[in-house]
Amino acid sequence: MFYGQYEHTIDKKGRVILPSKFRDMFKEYGIERLYVTTGLDNCLFLFTEDEWKSQESKLKSMPFTKSDFRKFNRMYFSGASQIDFDKQGRILLPKYLKDFAEIKRDVVIIGVANRMEIWSKERWQEYYKSSKGSFEEIAEKLVSQEG
């Protein structure tokens, strides 16, 4: 559903505009609400409402008697915020989430199939640079595990 990477800048009011391809998809599918939360690797995860409900259902089914599940759910859900976008497709990210992801001004928004991720531009460049060399090796491992 969501693919590609797009560079944007946080405006003076603290808003970031979502990529036009994503906004077009929101209109096509009647998406009006998004959910943002702390992601992994110091980025933010951004979900449509339907995908958020799907993720929430999966995570709620984890046994709360296990420490790792409790810890993950606490961090994941306590960082979550429901956000709306305006007519121009801008969203206002809560300060605590910008702090978590070390977002100051420039961001990269990437599509990762069922979710979007928002990265500080610097952190994305570091992550991409450190990960691109192992892409083929990881692909081979993952494909061999499935076969």
Image (cartoon, rainbow, N blue to C red):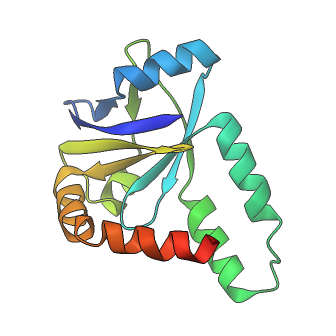
Is residue 71 in view?
yes
Quadrant the C terminus occupies: bottom right
Q: Residue at (66%, 84%) from the top-left corner?
A: 68
Q: Residue at (43%, 12%) from the top-left corner?
A: 87
Please determine whether, in this image, residue 43 is positioned above or below residue 88: below
Q: Residue at (33%, 59%) from the top-left corner?
A: 101
Q: Nearer the viewer, residue 19 or 78?
A: 19
Please determine whether, in this image, residue 47 is positioned above or below residue 29: below
Furthest residue toward front: 147
Q: Nearer the viewer, residue 3 or 93?
A: 3
64 vs 69, left or right, is: right
Give the tally of numbered discs.
Answer: 0
Q: Residue at (27%, 68%) from the top-left corner?
A: 131
Q: Position of residue 29 (x, y in %)?
A: 63, 18
Q: Position of residue 1 (x, y in %)?
A: 54, 34
When asked about the image quadrant of residue 109, the answer is top left
When asked about the image quadrant of residue 15, the answer is top left
Q: Position of residue 9 (x, y in %)?
A: 20, 35
147 vs 127, left or right, is: right
Q: Nearer the viewer, residue 42 or 24?
A: 24
When asked about the image quadrant of residue 5, the answer is top left
78 vs 116, left or right, is: right
Please determine whether, in this image, residue 55 is positioned above or below residue 141: above
Q: Position of residue 104 (x, y in %)?
A: 20, 49
Is residue 9 in view?
no
